[in-house]
Image (cartoon, helix red, strand yellow):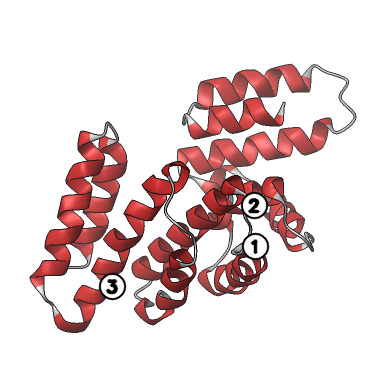
Amino acid sequence: MNRLINEAYYQNSKEELQQIRDLIAESDLPNKNDELLLIDAYIAVISKDLTMLDKEVIDRMKEKVFNISNFDEDGLIIYCNFMSFYDLNSNLLLSKRIIKQLVGSSSVRIQDKILAIIINMLIFCIRNKRFEETEVFVNYADQIKTKPEVFFYKLLIPAFYNIVKYQDNHDKKYLDETEIIIKSIKLAGMPDYGKELEELLVANK
């Protein structure tokens, strides 16, 4: 069930999530309420509208992550997908703790999730003009070797960090390098993601 939920989420499919929600609501699953809570949270994130959720629901999801003492792959997925529930300072605290714990993992699946968290943190820091907070995350990303399985995330790191470096000396080469990466992303068949990165770049010129 969790695999189906995750697949629907990563395909940005509210319709599939709603169908799974309807099945769970009619089932006798012992953890039915937790699964329904998870799906409602995913639908809100996809919709980019957290006002769809009661404050109690958001607090329960945040508490669920805070109560994880040792993160495994499932814990990483939950945190990565619901980072938008936290303010920047809480994310700085949580992400650094999690990354420090797992950045040395030999599991490619764990490395993939760590890089996803790093990228989210770079985005949050740039949007909040907290450029000085980004270097530690770039350094963590450098500790993960580039492999085919994590290539996309490794490609994105310099795109975001170039936006940060541009703030220091306004050297156009940093913008040019990010634009090359954006073009590559669009050519690879991810125009929506390329557009989001482009908007972030334009907002910080």
Give residue 7's quadrant in the image.
top right
Label 1, residues with CA under 10 Å away: few <14, some 14-19, many ≥20: some
Residue under label 2: 76
Q: What residue type is labelled 1?
A: Leu
Q: Which amino acid does label 2 sit on?
A: Leu
Looking at the image, tell me whether mark 1 or mark 2 is earlier in sequence order: 2
Front of the two marks 1 and 2? 1
Residue under label 3: 164
Question: Is residue 105 shown left or right of residue 44?
Answer: right
Element at label 2: helix
Q: Which amino acid does label 3 sit on?
A: Val
Q: Position of residue 130 (x, y in %)?
A: 39, 77
Q: Position of residue 104 (x, y in %)?
A: 61, 64
Question: Is residue 110 shown left or right of residue 170?
Answer: right
- Quick check: marks 3 and 2 in contact, CB under 8 Å? no
Front of the two marks 1 and 3? 1
Residue under label 1: 102
Q: Where is residue 181 in the image (x, y as percent from the top left)?
A: 22, 51
Q: Which of 133 and 101 is in front in this view?
A: 101
- Give the quarter of the figure containing the C terminus: bottom left
Question: Is residue 142 shown left or right of residue 202?
Answer: right
Whole-Å distance between the Cαs marked 1 and 3? 25 Å
Q: Which residue is drawn at 70% across and 45% down?
A: 74
Residue furthest left in the image: 172
Q: Which of 180 and 39 is in front in this view?
A: 180
